[in-house]
């Protein structure tokens, strides 16, 4: 800051008889600006250490390798489907130009591939509109449009059913998931894979064994929980599933767990209606933790085809399914059920099983799925 000096007043001499003498006044020095202090030297940024750089590179390579392996697993699981009806679809578009018979043949193959009548009609209508509007003649161009339409069908439900871990939304804590499905679809194995999936994302996962009526269901889940290193809340066989859910939600809260995954029955005694039982479990979750369950995942065996679609309709009406896990894709030559579920029920495919190991579960990627089918 500059300092300003005030000029002092000069005293006027008293009048005398004699002529006044001139008085010299010393000049007032001009104010001197203070010298600004020199800025402190800025320390140069230390270069990243060699070990840190190597660690980052190793992590990037590990992520790339995992993505490559996952892509290979998905492609392998779809081999049967790809070699079935979808390979014939690819052959339809191998000609240079679009033929008049292409549309009928394409319709037949999509229906036979379990894509469903509604989905097939929608895709054909949209494809024909694009071909006519853009005056497309080359079959290869129409083939690319077809693949794009199939991707759109699979991605459409995500606009309303995108899970919080794939968006910017904050996950409720604890995050409660009900896993439903009929017996024999791979439900318990899928729960184990989901446990490993969320653990790898850094979450503390706890399991609830509410399938108390199936023989050895609790023992089976206990084995998987031990392999995954996750705590399991369970009661004796034939216990009330509602009591298990009540205890599991309470345990997840008290232990500060991030995610609770609850196994449910796929078949009950003939006296009890399965859907009513699942509705009860949902109400218990809501009472224990308002807003839960936050996710209801339906596991579907892809080999069941249109029966799987009917299952999805029934479960959705009863317990408001929010997403689907497709299993056993490697055992079917069809696999088009994914399109029917997405289009007709508006449910997103969240995951697909790619094998029997704990890590054999892949996040569903619509583009990757379609590319693998039509490869």
Image: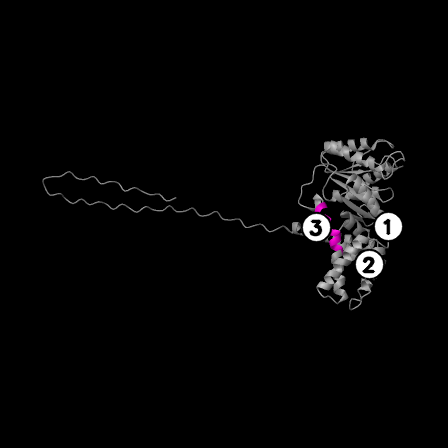
Check contact, mark 1 vs mark 2: CB within 8 A: no
Say which residue label 1 marks. Answer: 303
Q: Main secondary structure of the magenta part?
A: helix
Task: Name the quadrant of the N terminus.
Answer: top left
- Which marked residue is nearer to the observer: mark 3 or mark 2? 2
Q: Around disc 3, counting alpha carbons within 10 Å, would you say few (fewer than 14), some (14 to 19), or many (20 or more)? A: few
Q: Around disc 1, counting alpha carbons within 10 Å, would you say few (fewer than 14), some (14 to 19), or many (20 or more)? A: many
Q: Mark 3 and mark 2: span between their CA atoms?
A: 46 Å
Which of these two is toward me, 296 or 20? Answer: 296
Q: Is residue 155 magenta?
A: yes
Say if 45 sits above or below 99 in the image: above
Residues in magenta, as a range: 150-161
Q: Is residue 99 magenta?
A: no
Residue 59 numbered mark, or none: 3
> Where does the image place residue 287, in percent across and percent down from the top left?
74, 31
> Where does the image place residue 288, in percent across and percent down from the top left?
74, 31
Q: Mark 3 and mark 1: span between their CA atoms?
A: 37 Å
Residue 154 numbered mark, or none: none
Q: Answer with left or right where residue 11 lies relative to residue 247.
A: left
Q: Earlier in the sequence, mark 1 or mark 2?
A: 2
Q: Earlier in the sequence, mark 3 or mark 1?
A: 3
Say which residue label 2 marks. Answer: 107
Tell me the element at label 3.
helix
């Amino acid at each position: 800051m500059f300092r300003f000096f005030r000029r002092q007043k000069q005293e006027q001499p008293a009048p005398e008889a004699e002529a006044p003498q001139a008085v010299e006044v010393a000049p007032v020095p001009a104010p001197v600006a203070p010298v600004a202090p020199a800025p402190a030297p800025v320390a140069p940024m230390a270069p990243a250490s060699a070990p840190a750089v190597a660690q980052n590179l190793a992590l990037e390579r590990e992520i790339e390798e995992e993505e490559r392996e996952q892509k290979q697993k998905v492609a392998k699981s779809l081999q049967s489907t790809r070699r079935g009806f979808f390979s014939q679809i690819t052959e339809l578009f191998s000609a240079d130009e679009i033929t008049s018979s292409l549309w009928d043949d394409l319709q037949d193959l999509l229906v036979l591939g379990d894509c469903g009548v509604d989905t097939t009609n929608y895709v054909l209508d949209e494809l024909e509109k694009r071909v006519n509007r853009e005056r497309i003649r080359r079959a290869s161009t129409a083939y690319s449009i077809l693949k794009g339409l199939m991707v759109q069908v699979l991605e459409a439900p995500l606009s309303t059913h995108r899970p919080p871990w794939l968006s910017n939304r904050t996950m409720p804590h604890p995050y409660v998931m009900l896993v439903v499905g009929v017996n024999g679809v791979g439900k318990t194995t899928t729960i184990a894979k989901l446990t490993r999936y969320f653990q790898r994302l850094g979450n503390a996962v706890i399991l609830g064994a509410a399938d108390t009526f199936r023989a050895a269901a609790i023992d089976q889940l206990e084995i998987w929980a031990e392999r995954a290193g996750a705590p399991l809340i369970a009661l004796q066989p034939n216990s009330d599933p509602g009591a298990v859910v009540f205890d599991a939600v309470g345990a997840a809260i008290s232990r500060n767990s991030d995610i609770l995954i609850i196994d449910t029955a796929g078949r009950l005694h003939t006296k009890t209606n399965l859907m009513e039982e699942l509705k009860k479990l949902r109400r218990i979750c809501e009472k224990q933790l308002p807003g839960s369950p936050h996710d209801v995942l339906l596991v579907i065996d892809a080999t069941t085809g249109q029966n799987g679609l009917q299952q999805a309709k029934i479960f959705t009406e009863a317990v408001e399914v929010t997403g689907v896990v497709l299993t056993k894709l490697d055992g079917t030559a069809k696999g088009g059920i994914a399109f029917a579920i997405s289009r007709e029920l508006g449910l997103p495919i969240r995951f697909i099983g790619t094998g029997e190991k704990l890590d054999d579960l892949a996040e569903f990627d619509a583009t990757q799925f379609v590319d693998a089918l039509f490869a």
